[in-house]
Image (cartoon, rainbow, N blue to C red):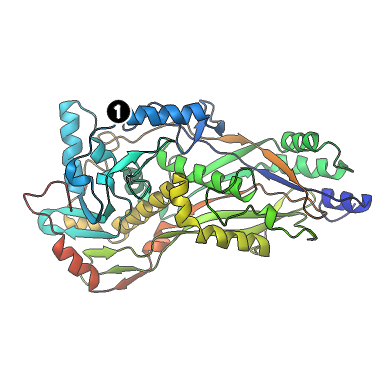
Amino acid sequence: MPSCFGIRCAARRMGMAAFALVVVGGWCTALNAQFYTNQRSVGGISVDTDGILGNASVDMTGQLAQFRTKSAQQIPADLGTMTPQRKVSLRGIEVAIAEAANAGKPLPDEVKYLAGLQKIEYIFVYPEQNDIVLVGPAEGWKIDKRGNVVGATTGRPVMLLDDLLTALRTARRAAQGGISCSIDPTQEGLTRLQAHARKLRTIGNPQQTVAGIENVLGMQDISFTGVEPTSHFARVLVAADYRMKRIAMGFEPAPVQGLPSFLTMIPARSRGLGNMLPRWWLEPNYEPILHDADGLAFELRDAGVKTMTEEDFLTANGNREHTGQANPVAQRWSEMMTDKYGELAVADPIFGQLRNCMELAVVGALFVKERLPEKAQYSMPILMDAEVAKTEAFPAPKQVPSKASVLRRGRNWIISASGGVLVNSWAVADKTQQSDAPAAVRAEAVPSEKSSWRWN
């Protein structure tokens, strides 16, 4: 029996031109909200009550946009304009939550959307006020055609209170290995795929061949660590993961120029990847965090997202082995994805939502690692109470059908079926440098008794 991957060897023995075969996982999400809407769509995807994922229909995303537009509250005048430094008091948010609960009313949009914050650049602790303040650029918001809540002029997704609550409550758990999600084929599916591949002697009808590959590989599993699979935060992770795969594998075009699919980058005369499984995943990418001498002011710098890649080796019995190495073509594609991420975060807001969630996870890690609530003598009783300040809970995404496609590229078959998102928030929080710069900004941002819970 040949030692190399069955499809590749069969094509070589037959002297035929092979095709590139790509098998990827799917993704989806749900939205049935106390804070948002009862339309079941986030990031253009949907999930049924059995946890099976699929793309949301155009009608579903359109209905979500219409619902949010009709139910949107008027934006307060002082929140409508762009500002480089909007201050948001966590103690003030707790007061707003308590007031809404006592009055039996839903939370105002401005609280749900954290006063339009689009990123967090500073975290300030004020022991005298028993408060912690988040600071970053912000503006008014609008509902885009897919139902996303984005900045009125920048198009960047706003940060959500729901994701902040999840980040704060999972921060200690994240210290044990980060927050992650992954879509992976089952061991049984890979074993069946190897056996099926060894039987193939010709491409035949491409559609039938693709259907056969999808059938033998079967359902793929969706897994999470460090975060509840039922949370909105988890939906963002899995949605961004799968969107990245679909762009990489050419199932849909990138919404920005200069990011071709991975498959089109493979040289026509390439020997192919054979039995190698190219994997991509997304991680936070930060400069060291600055802090003052007293540990009361922190500056998050150059917050971004980096695309990582390596290859798995698929053995004859269908087992995967990590190589720790990256295919040169996959590496080039990951670098292009990283370079284009800022544009992607606006063109497809799910990538912007992922960056927001990563940043909030880093904030949560700093709260625990630097003992910020203790320094402020403020335990965040409402924000940390899951019964008082409830987050959204949806059916957990569990599985997704495999999806295959064929593309003529050289003489080999290529299989890709794994990847994910890794939010190594504690690793980011561990990289700090002392500086006087954050303290100067902190002195200008101190809340007063007359301050609202948010101010410019």
Q: Residue at x 62, y 63 (%)?
A: 332
Looking at the image, is 127 positioned above or below residue 18? below
Q: Is label 1 in a helix, a strand or a loop?
A: helix
Q: Residue at x 78, y 49 (%)?
A: 408
The residue lying toward the viewer, choosing from 66 and 207, is 66
Q: Which residue is mark 1?
A: 71
> Counting other residues with Cα less than 10 Å from the Cα at mark 1, is it few (<14), some (14-19), or many (20 or more)?
few
Residue 125 drawn at (x, y percent): 19, 59
Residue 152 drawn at (x, y percent): 32, 45
User: Disc 1 residue type?
Assistant: Ser
Q: Is residue 47 left or right of residue 312?
A: left
The residue lying toward the viewer, choosing from 243 and 320, is 243
Looking at the image, is 182 positioned above or below residue 288? above
Looking at the image, is 26 positioned above or below residue 290? above
Q: Is residue 60 left or right of residue 53?
A: left
Q: Residue at x 77, y 35 (%)?
A: 207
Where, by quadrant of the figure, is residue 433 drawn?
A: bottom left
Q: Is residue 327 visible?
A: no
Q: How many marks?
A: 1
Q: Is residue 12 visible?
A: yes
Residue 456 drawn at (x, y percent): 18, 53
Looking at the image, is 376 positioned above or below residue 197? below
The residue lying toward the viewer, choosing from 158 and 46, is 158
Q: Is residue 224 left or right of residue 314?
A: left
Where, by quadrant of the figure, is residue 55 drawn?
A: top right
Q: Residue at x 10, y 58 (%)?
A: 128
Residue 122 drawn at (x, y percent): 26, 60
Where, by quadrant of the figure, is residue 178 drawn?
A: bottom left
